Amino acid sequence: MIWEDAQLLGGQVYRSRPPSDAVREQLIEAGVTGVEVPEEEPGGPAYYGEVLRRAPGRITSVFAQIADAEPGSEVLVFGDRTSMIAAMLQTLAGKPVADILDEYEDDLRALNSVAAEPLDDAALDLYCADACLAMVAFLGSTDIAGYLTASGLTFEQLARLRELLLQL
C-alpha cells in the first residue's frame, strides 16, 4: 500500500498532507478512519491560540473523531493544522515538550528539503528557532484537556483518547 508522505505517530495516528484519491480509497478499503484538520488562517504556531479561539468546535471534533474511532483501527490526520493537532495529542500523552519540539523541528527541516524553493541553512535555522519558540509558547499557555472539554469533548472521550495515546 502506498502511504505517500504519511508518517507513523505512535502506531495509530498518521500525519500527512491530504492523500490522493487513489490513496484515500486504499485507506478506506483498509479500514483507516480519515480525519481532516480544518484550515484556518493565519498559519504557524504563533497563531495556534487564535485558531483554537476561532474554531473550538472544529478543532475539538478532530479529537472526538480520534477518540470515537473503532478500537484497533488506524486514524489518518491530515490538513493544515496537523502540527498543532500532533503537538496537542503528544501533550495529552505526557510527552516532554523538548521531545515534541525536536520532532517538530525535524518535520520543518524535512519539509524544507522538499520545498520548491528551500530556505538556505541560515534562514532555515532562524525559521526553526522562531517556529519552535512559538510552539513552546503555545504549549505552555494552553490547557489542552481543559480547552477540549470546554469545547465539547466529553470526559469519557478524553479518557478514551488518553488511554489510546498511552498504548502507543
Image: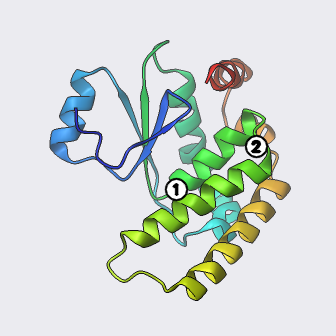
Residue 103 higher or lower than 129, as above or below: above
Q: Residues within 10 Å of mark 2 (few under 14, many from 20)?
A: some
Asked whether, in this view, residue 53 is left or right of residue 16, the answer is right
Amino acid type at circle 1 is Arg
Residue ranking furthest to the left: 22
Q: Residues within 10 Å of mark 1 (few under 14, many from 20)?
A: many
Residue 159 higher or lower than 87, as above or below: above
Q: Secondary structure at mark 2?
A: helix
- Measured from the top left, where is residue 152 in percent x and y? 66, 34
Find residue 83 and report its image quarter: bottom right
At 55% from the left and 83% from the top, the residue drawn is 121
At 51% from the left and 51% from the top, the residue drawn is 82
Amino acid type at circle 2 is Ile
Find residue 73 and report its image quarter: top left
Residue 150 visible to the viewer: no
At 61% from the left and 24% from the top, the residue drawn is 168
Which numbered dot is residue 144? Answer: 2
Residue denoted by label 1: 81
- Measured from the top left, where is residue 115 in percent x and y? 37, 74
Among numbered discs 1 and 2, the one appearing first in the sequence = 1
Q: Secondary structure at mark 1?
A: loop
Q: CA distance from mark 1 to mark 2?
A: 15 Å
Asked whether, in this view, residue 56 is left or right of residue 78, the answer is right
Q: Nearer the viewer, residue 86 or 110?
A: 110
- Measured from the top left, where is residue 3 in percent x and y? 29, 40
- Measured from the top left, where is residue 64 in percent x and y? 57, 30
Residue ranking furthest to the top: 71
